[in-house]
Structures are given as structure tokens and as C-alpha cells.
Image (cartoon, rainbow, N blue to C red):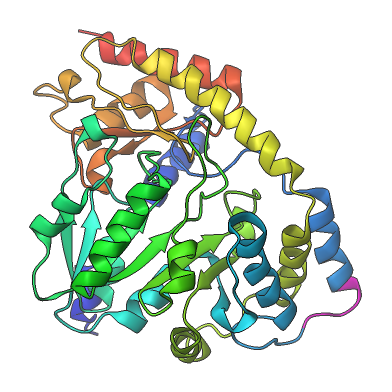
């Protein structure tokens, strides 16, 4: 048996690998706290769960159209109208198995062999492998911690070539929590349009933005330039529905039709009952989002104050998502020379699971998720601090 070359080049998800190691230690009887997996600790809203139960009781268990139920696609289009004033139709949307699936479909639809795809670093772990699986070439664009890890037009221009076909943006960012202001997004979009570069904008954390920062989106640019942008969303983070697997794409109707071809030959429609639940989520109420946003902003401040109290640490204060991405290489030594070995040390000595920055393209850093209870967060960071200070 011979495994394909493209799959041999792909790497397993680092975040899932860390979680597996944590589960292994738990099985050995160790008490492990995970600050690794990007998952809200809030329950899915009751009205969403009830909608799924009702669908099951009523026998709504058959295939649906590949791109999703018309009512759900319409609800997604109306979401962009409700929050961003964007006029979109159901034909401009497609429902996939989580935001990750939406992003993968776009890479398969837009990237030809040899095409270069700009990916600002730090980046979400799956972007480069997705590009590689589409036989494209990931081109990593360095950014600065002092600038909140946000890519500038100058950064992107310096990394682009005539072979550059796509740019993947992420706001708010996983792993940094960095959030592009609207003017910054629009500037990048105008540059990309002039260069003939298509933008995939990953906005799955779009409702988790903290004051004084304000919400931003490329859906407003898409409305006037639908052939130049696709916007990916999801219910996973904003509605605490990670396991439900509801990802969305807002795109030109022709691009949606192309993605339907891919999805029709791979996964077909997402779970029928989940689609009913997703409609309930989009219809509201959305009070859980406000509750989560308030809690995450409080936890961000708690974590930021503790982490920045460690000597030699540099850490930008994020405006969104639920991650901090501090520069911790001041603590590296011969025994722990990189982020992976440091994460292993912290896991083994403190029982705290974290994700090495090398997985996100910056080995100086480690990703901390603050999607846990306030007291657990405080005690966990105190344990991490003791490991780092140990000489």
C-alpha cells in the first residue's frame, strides 16, 4: 500500500495532538487542566437543543440539499444583514461541516497546483496543510508582536509574487486574538483587488470582540465585490456549538455552486437535525453571545495581568477570540529549547495543557486559551508561572 504524496506532506493537527496527550495523562490518574483546545466552556443554549430534539421526534432524519436547507441558507444571509447591514441572498451561502470544512472547500475550489497562498503568521494550524492538500504553495507572511501580529499591506506586498492567487485572513485571530479594525481590513481588501488576489476571510470569532474595539468584517467589501472575497463563519465559537459542526460560507453564487460540486462528491449535506438547530440559533435569542463576550473579556484581563507579570514576557492584549499568545522564549534553555518542549514540561510538571507556538508559525510563543472558569484560569496560570520561574 502506498499513501499519496500530498497526504504524506500533511501534518496532524497540533491542537488535537496536545489534547490527546492530556487525555493520556488523565487516564493515568493525573489531574490535567486544558488551556489548549479552543472551545467555549458555556453550554449550548437550551432553545437550540430543543430544536434538535423536536427535529428528531418529528423524523427529520433524511437527506437535505447539499448546500443546506433553504431556510438555513436564508438565515445565514440574514445574519450578515442583521449585524453588518449587508444584503445577501440564500444562493450566496452554503452550509458545511464546521468552519474548517468551509475553509477546506474554498481552498479546493480556488487553488490550482503551484498557486501561492499568502498566510500571515501566526496562523491557525490548518491553513498551510489545507493549501498543500489543494496542491498549492503556502507563503508565510511574517508579522510583528509589537503590532498585535496584524499584517500590513506592506507585509503582504513584500511576500506576494505573480503566482500569488489567494490571501487567507483571520479576524479575530486564532492563536493571537488579534483583531483587524474595519479600516485596516478595507485597506487590505483594496490592495488585494488591485493585485487580483482573492481573499478568504475567516471570521468564525466575529461576535467575540471586546470593547473598546468594534466589530469588523469583509462581508461589507464582499457586497460590492462578490467575485473577490469569501467570508467564512460558524456557530462553533459564538454560540458554543463546537460539536454540532455548522460552518458557513458567504460567496458569489457561482463560487457557491462550485463548492456544492466538491461537497456533493465528498460529504453531501450536514446533519439534517443540526440544521434545524442552527436555524433556531440564528433566529435567536442571542443573549448567550453577550454573556460569553462579557465573561471572556473579564478572563482576558485576568490572564493578561498574570502573564505580563512574568519577567521577560512580551504579550499584546487581544481584542477578540479567547486566546493569549505571549512571547516566552526568555524562559527557553538547553533542556527546553523551544515551544514544544516547554509545553511538554508544563504539562508534565504543572498538569496544564497548552499549545506550542511552533504549530502556529512562531516558535517563540505559546498559546493560552482562557475559555475556562475564572478561578481555574487563575490557579492554572499560577502553576505555569511556577514552572517558568523554576531554576
Classify the position of the C terminus by image quarter. top left
> Residue at 60% of width from left, 63% of height from top?
80
Q: Is residue 246 magenta?
A: no
What secondary structure characterizes most of the magenta part?
A: loop
Q: Nearer the viewer, residue 210 or 58?
A: 210
On the rendered structure, is 182 left or right of 189? Answer: right
Q: Is residue 95 visible?
A: yes
Q: Where is 299 relative to 104, above or below?
A: above
Q: Residue at x 49, y 44 (%)?
A: 38
Residue 203 is left or right of residue 337, and the answer is right
Q: Vertically, is 168 above or below 367? A: below
* Whole-percent x, y for residue 291 in the image: 70, 35
Is residue 340 or residue 107 the one in the foreground?
A: 107
Q: Position of residue 339 (x, y in %)?
A: 22, 34
Q: Residue 58 colored magenta?
A: yes
User: How many tags in the picture?
Assistant: 0
Closer to us: 130 or 202: 202
Query: Residue 227: x and y, percent?
Result: 38, 80
Q: Quadrant of the N terminus?
A: bottom left
Q: Where 226 falls versus 337 (above or below)?
A: below
Q: Which residues are magenta?
A: 56-61
Q: Quadrant of residue 18?
A: top left
Residue 303 or residue 19, whichever sits in front: 303
Inspect this view and state whether residue 166 appears: no
In the rendered image, which quarter is residue 290 located in?
Answer: top right
User: Which residue is located at x 49 percent, y 27 percent?
Assistant: 30
User: Measured from the top left, where is residue 216 in percent x and y?
Assistant: 48, 49
Q: Is residue 26 left or right of residue 289?
A: left
Compared across the picture, whether 205 is left or right of 156 comes to right
| Residue displayed at 39% across by 76% down | 106
Amino acid at each position: 500500500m502506498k499513501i499519496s504524496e500530498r497526504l504524506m506532506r500533511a501534518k496532524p493537527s497540533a491542537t488535537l495532538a496536545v489534547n490527546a496527550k492530556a487525555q493520556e495523562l488523565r487516564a493515568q490518574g493525573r489531574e490535567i487542566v486544558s488551556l489548549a483546545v479552543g472551545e467555549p466552556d458555556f453550554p449550548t443554549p437550551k432553545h437550540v437543543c430543543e430544536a434538535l430534539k423536536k427535529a428528531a421526534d418529528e423524523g427529520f432524519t433524511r437527506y437535505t440539499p447539499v448546500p443546506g436547507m433553504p431556510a438555513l441558507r436564508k438565515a445565514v444571509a440574514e445574519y450578515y444583514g442583521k449585524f453588518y447591514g449587508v444584503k445577501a441572498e440564500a444562493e450566496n451561502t452554503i452550509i458545511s461541516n464546521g468552519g474548517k470544512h468551509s475553509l477546506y472547500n474554498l481552498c479546493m475550489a480556488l487553488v490550482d497546483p503551484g498557486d501561492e497562498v499568502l498566510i500571515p503568521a501566526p496562523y491557525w494550524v490548518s491553513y498551510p496543510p489545507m493549501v498543500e492538500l489543494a496542491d498549492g504553495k503556502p507563503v508565510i507572511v511574517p508579522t510583528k508582536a509589537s503590532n498585535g501580529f496584524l499584517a500590513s499591506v506592506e507585509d503582504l506586498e513584500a511576500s506576494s509574487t505573480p503566482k500569488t492567487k489567494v490571501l487567507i485572513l483571520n479576524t479575530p485571530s486564532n492563536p493571537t486574538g488579534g483583531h483587524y479594525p474595519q479600516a485596516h481590513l478595507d485597506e487590505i481588501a483594496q490592495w488585494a483587488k488591485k493585485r487580483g488576489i482573492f481573499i478568504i476571510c475567516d471570521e468564525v470569532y466575529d461576535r467575540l470582540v471586546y470593547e473598546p474595539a468594534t466589530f469588523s468584517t469583509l462581508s461589507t467589501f464582499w457586497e460590492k465585490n462578490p467575485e473577490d472575497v469569501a467570508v467564512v463563519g460558524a456557530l462553533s465559537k459564538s454560540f458554543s456549538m463546537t460539536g454540532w459542526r455548522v460552518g458557513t460560507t458567504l460567496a458569489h453564487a457561482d463560487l457557491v455552486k462550485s463548492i456544492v460540486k466538491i461537497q456533493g462528491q465528498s460529504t453531501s449535506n450536514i446533519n439534517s437535525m443540526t440544521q434545524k438547530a442552527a436555524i433556531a440559533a440564528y433566529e435567536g435569542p442571542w443573549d448567550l453571545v453577550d454573556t460569553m463576550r462579557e465573561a471572556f473579556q473579564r478572563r482576558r484581563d485576568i490572564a493578561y495581568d498574570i502573564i505580563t507579570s512574568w519577567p521577560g514576557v512580551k504579550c499584546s492584549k487581544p481584542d477578540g477570540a479567547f486566546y493569549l499568545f505571549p512571547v516566552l522564549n526568555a524562559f527557553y534553555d538547553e533542556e527546553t529549547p523551544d515551544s514544544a518542549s516547554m509545553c511538554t514540561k508544563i504539562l508534565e510538571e504543572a498538569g496544564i495543557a497548552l499549545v506550542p507556538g511552533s504549530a502556529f508559525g512562531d516558535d517563540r510563543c505559546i498559546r493560552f486559551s482562557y475559555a475556562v472558569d475564572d478561578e481555574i484560569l487563575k490557579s492554572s496560570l499560577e502553576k505555569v508561572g511556577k514552572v517558568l520561574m523554576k531554576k
